[in-house]
Each structure stands twice: as C-alpha cells, then as structure tokens.
Image (cartoon, rainbow, N blue to C red):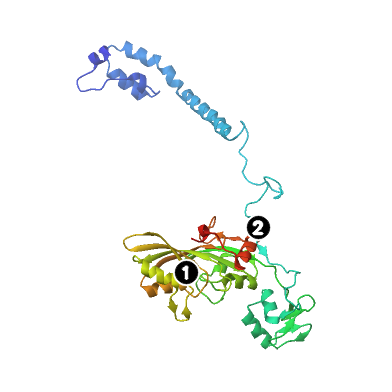
Amino acid sequence: MSRRHEDRKPGARVARPAKKVTGKKGSAKKASSKKAPSKKAPSKKASSKKAPAKKAPATKGPTKKSATKKGPAKKRRVGAPGQARKPLGRKKGADPKKPGGRQRGARRQQGLLVTATTTAIATKDGKVRLNQYLAQCGLCSRRAADELIATGRIELNGDIVTELGTRVDPQHDEVWHDGKRVQPERATYVLFNKPKGVICTNARHEQKKRVIDYLPTVRGRLFTVGRLDLDSEGLILLTNDGTFAMEMTHPRYGVPKLYNVVLRGRVTQEELSKARGGVWLSEGPTAGMRLRVSRTTRDRTYLKVTLREGKNREIRRVFAKLGYPVVTLKRIRIGGLSLHGLRAGTWRFVQLHEIQELRTLARGEELPDAELA
C-alpha cells in the first residue's frame, strides 16, 4: 500500500490492476501508464494476468452450475428430487363417494330437483281442494290456481273443470294443466340469510333482486315464509309446504323470532313498558313483545326483541309511533334456528330434526329463556 501511494500523482486515483484487468487492452495500457517509468514491471504484471483474463468466460461457468444445483433444491421442498409437483384435488375418474375423492359443493353445483312425491296430502276423507292440490304441485299459488280453473285450463280425469270448490283425490285422480300432468312435489325447506336491499317476492316483473334469485340451483317453486322488508336483514325460511308456512307465521302458533334492533335515541323505561304491553296500529293492537336492553349510548339504544306474531313491519311501526325510529333491524333466530355458519346472501337446507323441532314448538312448547332473550 505504501508503494501505491508513493507512485500515485496528486489528484489521481490509486491504480488497481487486479480488479480492472478483464482481458481488454485499453485497461492494461492505462494501468501501465499510471505506474513508475520502469516498463518491465508493468509488462510482467500485464503478461502474468493475461492468463486469468483468458479464463474469464470460464469463471461464469460456476454461476451456471450453481443455478442448476438450485433447481433440485426447489423440488425437494415439494416432494422427492426429480419429481414434478402434483396438482391438488380429486383425480380424474375418482369416485366422489370414496374418502379423499369427495368433490366439495357437488350437491349445490348439481342443484336440487324437486321431484314428485308418492305420499298423499293428509286429509280426513282423502280429498283436497283443487287449488290447494295445484299449489302443492308447485304450479302456482292458490289465487293463481283459481284463475286457471276459472279459465278452463285445468282438466280432471280428462274433463275440463271450471268450478272453484272442486275436490280431488291425490291418490287416484289425474290432474292436467295445458296438456301436462301435474303431481305433488316433495317438501323442501331452505334457511337463507337475507342481506339488505333484497325483496321477498316471487313476482317476475320485480326489478329489484329477489330472495329466490339467490337459489338458482334449487329447481322448483319456493316461496318465503313471512317477509322481511327491504331495509331489514337476517334469517328467513323458504319452502313449498303451505301447511308448514302457516304454522311458522300464524299468531295462533306463536313461533318466537328474535331480532337485534338499534333505535335512534335513548328509550325510557316507560316507553319500553308500552311496547311490551302492546301499541295500537291501524289494523288493531299488537300482541306485545319481549324486550331486553343490550346497551345504550348517547344517541342509540340496542335492543333484543322477541315477537310471536308477524304484522307488517311491526317493530318499525311500533317504535316509530313511540318516537324512536329504527336504524337497523336484523332477525337472528327463528325458533331454534340461528345465523351460525351463514354469511349474508348464503343459504342451507333445513335438516329433518330441525323441522320437527319447529313443528313441536308451534304446538305450544316453550323455548328456554336463554334462547329467547
């Protein structure tokens, strides 16, 4: 290092021939010009370091070899050396019923075909009204069935029927609509988590998104059990069983439904007592509701409300009359059914034991207070 500094001229950089020699002639000449006037020493250094300059392309070889060695290292992370990574999932031709070959969501992708049932509609004499039979077949509602009967589009055992009170035997009679035979469908029960902005109707001309638009894979006529208004959200049932729908909605059966309600303002105990006892609306007094205050803030009151009847927009109208408009309303429970596992806009089929529990509840058995409040 001392010789370098002695040879260096003022203001010039230190010559480093070992790093700058790359096999080019110009760099060798510059290195020799900056050193001492003795020409033999730089010539020997230049001549002695020409050999590594020739091997310069060979020095790139190890970098390529190291790159080739890194390839198997990446493969070892996935599996054995020299084996390509296999795609995850079920193999082609694998049986979905076997363990490991099940296709997720296969039932929902294929859809549910509501097929005809061989069981008769339970009645005392074995006969039912024709419009009820057509509704059970999923053709239309009872009111629309009356219009079809009145216009002569329904045939019973080969004869056109126009009398509205006609009764049929589901076991033996044959009913035809526009040349096609109609048969009762199997009962289907669906639990849906309705988001805001979705309407509960089956009208075809409706421009807003309907609840049934979220169930394109369930083929058959379904209708909502009760209603939730456009700004409300939460649980709602869909079915093609009219008897079950009546048991879930009629005040005589009183199936409890639990709601999370947020009100604008701080509600007093006096106003809560009025809501519990019943408020007079345009169609008559309400049957009252069970209330529990979850918490309150400066300008909001959070309630849990349990209803056993289903008047149109009852919760909103009751609290609006008391002077506390509803900010948000969400149904979180129907009997023993809850929102667990259901995101907004998703649905699932109701299990058989859940249907039996709802029917048992509709006959008069009470739920525990912990579930109702």
Q: Earlier in the sequence, mark 2 or mark 1?
A: 2
> Depth check: 196 or 365 in front?
365
| Residue 172, numbered label | none
Residue 291 position, x and y percent, is 44, 65
Q: Left of 10 or right of it: where is 28?
A: right
The amino acid pointed to by label 1 is Met
Seen in the picture, residue 94 relative to 31 is either above or below; the reply is below
Residue 325 in sight here: no
Write down the quadrant of residue 297 in the picture.
bottom left
| Quadrant of the rendering where the N terminus is positioned | top left
Give the number of the mark in front: 2 or 1: 1
Cα distance between the residues tagged 2 and 1: 40 Å
Instruction: Give the structural element (helix, strand or loop) at label 1.
Output: loop
Q: Left of 65 or right of it: where is 112?
A: right
Q: Which residue is mark 1?
A: 289
Residue 294 in sight here: yes
Q: Which residue is mark 2?
A: 107
Q: Left of 220 or right of it: where is 329?
A: left
Instruction: Give the structural element (helix, strand or loop) at label 2.
Output: helix
Q: Left of 84 or right of it: where is 32?
A: left
> Depth check: 218 or 194 in front?
194
